[in-house]
Image: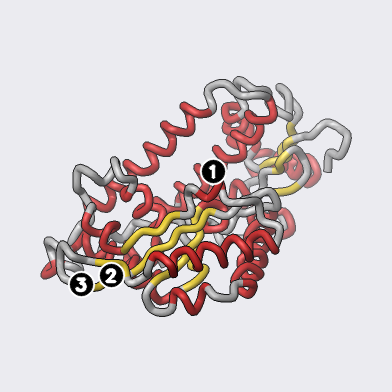
Amino acid sequence: MAGAGRPVLVAYPLSFDWSFLYWYFSGEGSPFDYSRCFGIKTAFAVKANIPIASAGRSKLIPNLRANSHHTHSKTQSSRRRHSQICLSGKACMGTVIDQRRLYSDQRFQELKTSLIGAPGICGDKACVYAIGSFGRREASQPSDLDLFIVSLCHGKEKEYKSRLTKLEEILLKADLIRASRALGFPDFSKDGDFLQHRTSISLIQTTRDKSDDAINTFTARLLLLLASKPLVGDDVHLQVINEVIAKYWSEFPEHGDCFMPAFLSNDILQFWRTLCLNYEARTSEKTPRDRANRKIRNYKLKAFLLKVYGRSGDSSRTGYGAPLFG
């Protein structure tokens, strides 16, 4: 580890990783300067007294090889490369991700067991789920909670009413606030403005409607599908997801096994493009610390995009839905 010294990039293959990282750090300065790098392939060739051409991956000794099985999958190749990239000489990304997941799961379980009235209030009519860093299982100590409440409805069409009453909503939010404060979580953003309650019908009926963006149901629906984790009401959470997905197939029920979900794919692309545009607009002028945090968020966004698009090779309802939303 570099410690107080200067970090050196140790990589295999160095030619690829150096060019990728140098581009990534362009404009703000690389921690490896212009030439602090060390190639494992060259080192192995020198140590083994063999030509560079004979020092390929298959000829490396076992403890120098990556642990994962090599495939031609873009996602797998990306994970493989990034698992060997050191962040400022301190820790590899694979270790960081594992630590974040462990921390996220532990804190999430603590919050679950601290809730008193929420499970009874939600019952079989509502759910509470996390989005953001806890929804993606990449939270760290400073991370705040981003929670959504979604309830099922009853009644006839155009007269739907939430099964979760207004008083129950107040009591539910009070329990969430009490438990999160007791565990030392930061208070909910913007004085709880994002701790919202929506109905399942509102998420479904606005699909492909002109009001979808204006009332923000588009973002809420995509976050539910792509980056949510249930805190209370797991069965209701899964039911709402299935109902939302079914809406994208509603016009072709007889072709469910071969239907290409063009509208769903388009919504996912539009969602991520909007996130990227908003992100760039908010971070055009930042302090050095802010720019450093931006690099981390940029990396996390790219890694998550690789996971989303790398797993959606099968466009059938089962193949597309199971990995992406399961």
Mark closest to the chain's N terminus, 1 or 3 = 3
**Where is residue 322 shown, x and y percent of the image?**
37, 67
Residue named by callout 3: 155
Q: Is residue 230 above or below residue 64?
A: below
- Using residue 53 as the reference point, say whether residue 319 is left or right of it: left
Report if residue 13 is visible in the image: yes
Residue at horizontal 71 percent and vertical 58 percent from the top: 184
Q: Residue at x 54, y 43 (%)?
A: 190
Residues at marks 1 and 3 touching, judged by CB atoms closer than 8 Å: no
The image position of residue 29, as x and y in percent, is: 68, 23
Q: Which residue is mark 1?
A: 190
Query: How far apart are labels 3 and 2 at the CA level?
Result: 7 Å
Marks 3,2: beta carbons within 8 A:
yes
Question: What kind of residue is marked 1?
Answer: Lys
> Which amino acid does the dot numbered 2 rest on?
Cys
Residue on which disc 2 sits? 153
What's the amino acid at mark 3?
A: Gly
